[in-house]
Structure formats: C-alpha cells, structure tokens
Amino acid sequence: MNVQVNDFVLEIGSGHNPSARSNVLCDKFLVDDTQRGGQIVADRPIVEADGQYLPFADNSFDYVICRHVLEHVEDPELMISELERVASRGYIETPSELGERLYGWPYHDWILNQVNDKLIIQKNQLDNQFGHLFHILASRDSDFSRFHQSYHSLFLIQYEWNEKVKYELVNSDESVLKKELGNIETLLANKLSNRSLSRWYGKILRKAMTDILPTQLTRQLKSWFAQRHQSNKNPDLTEIVVCPLCKVDVEWERDVIICNSCKVEYPIVNHIPRLVPSMN
C-alpha cells in the first residue's frame, strides 16, 4: 500500500487485525465474530458503520483501506462509490476467484478478478464442497501451509486505486479465471524461476515472527505503531462524522448522535458511535 507519512487513513472492516497505519477504524459488526478470525480491535478511534453507508464527510481522508469486505456487501457499486467519496486514494483486497474456488466462503456474495488495471465483479454462484477441508489443511498441515504462503498472491486480489476505482460488474456466470488462466500460469512460472535467496530469507523471517511471537504481543506491537501515527494525526470524530444516509452534519450529545434532517438518532455505546442505519 502506497500510504504516505502524513496521510489521514480510514480502514473499513478493520476487524481483529487492523493495519498499524490506520488512523480511524470502521466495522459493521463490533460483537459478531462469525465472519472474522477473532475479537474486534478498538485501540484507536472507531465507529460502527456499514461500508455502503459511510458516516464521514466528503474527502475526509487521504487514503482508505478496504480489506476483505467488498466480497461481503449487498451492493458493491454503492460501496465503491462511498470509498471514492470519502478518500482520493485507497487499497482494496479480496480473495481472487482462485482463492474462492479452493477455499470457498459460503458468506461471500461476490467473486472478484483483476484483469489489467480493472476489477471484474461477478455474483458468487460457486458450489464450494471442499473449502472446509482446505481451510483445515492450511491451519494444521505445515506442508500445505508452506504451499499457501509461497503462492499467497495467487489467492488474493490486491488493488490500489487513485481518484477512481476501475471496475466492471459482470452479469454472467462464465469464469473470468478460465479466460485468464494463461496469464496466471505465466505468473506462476515466473515465481518458480525467480526465487532469490533474499526472498527465501524473508519468508523464513516472517514465519519465525509468526511462530515465535504470540498473537497478543503482535497486536500490542501493531497498536503501539498505530498510536505513534495517531500522534501525527489526532482525529476528532465530531469534525468528520455525518449522517450515513443523508450525509449532512449531525449533533453530538453524551449518549446519542442526532440527524435533524433524517430525524434519526444513533446511539453511542461505550464511547463508540453506532452509525449503522436501519433499512426498515
């Protein structure tokens, strides 16, 4: 991610493993851990919000991180428009079609591929019969885990954008992966032939850090780095939060945020604004 030193950064779907570089966190589910790998981390300013209805004013941020969220949402076009509204640059990460076919997450609504500099988005119609098996292998079998780490980039879409997200919503069940298989085979061949010693050492070091450092300590280190960035950018949520529906300024009271335009009240629970609009 090309995040600059002075960038003010929002992270959507921050979950249990937010980036150390994010200044403000945003997650739709603060309590429900069903679709993530652990409990929510709230070590810096955080709001509960839906990425399709972001409660931030236009251009509030320099950069927005959106990792493993876009494949979950009801309306990916709406969410992309919100990313572009609140920031001028950003990073999107999702499983690739190859990752979806291998691992299969039943709660993913969309499949993404990247063709050149464009995201191709399709409705997920895969029947993933064996995904649970490969999840078990990745977590428990060292040989399979090494395979996964060696070719991790094949299982991910890692897309950085500037000004506009280039994408196409495709109304077809024809596999984009099948069309791009030749390019993926070329990428795989290059990875096999260009394994330098430094890359090998890098993988060993990353594995050592993962195996040696307990998860709690790793989170504490990330939190410490995040706090250092906070000293440069000390966000005041009252200055950037707006109504998630109509995008106008809101009134802050001790336990509630009020939108006088929509006549809606949003609670503040344990100092965290709960800004998920009711769609009833």
Image: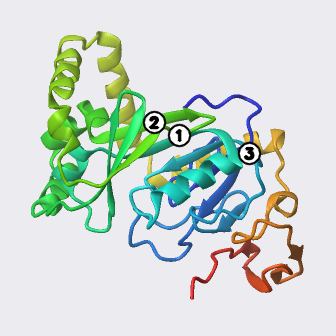
Q: Which mark is residue 159?
A: 2
Is residue 14 at all visible to an observer of this figure?
A: no
Q: Residue at x 44, y 42 (%)?
A: 167
Q: Is residue 244 above or below residue 134?
A: below
* Discs 1, 2 touching: Cβ within 8 Å: yes
Between tags 1 and 2, which lies in front?
A: 1
Counting residues from the N terminus, which is met first, the one under dot 1 or under dot 2?
2
As helix, strand or loop, the secondary structure at mark 3 comes to: strand
**Amino acid at circle 2:** Tyr
Q: Which mark is residue 173?
A: none
Q: CA distance from mark 2 to mark 3?
A: 18 Å
**Amino acid at circle 1:** Val
Q: Is residue 239 above or below residue 257?
A: above
Name the spot of residue 58 as percent of width and height, x first: 76, 52
**Is the residue marked by circle 1 packed among few (<14), some (14-19), or many (20+) residues within 10 Å?**
many
Name the spot of residue 277 as percent of width and height, x first: 64, 78
Q: Residue furthest front?
A: 171
Q: Which mark is residue 165?
A: 1
Q: Which mark is residue 61?
A: 3
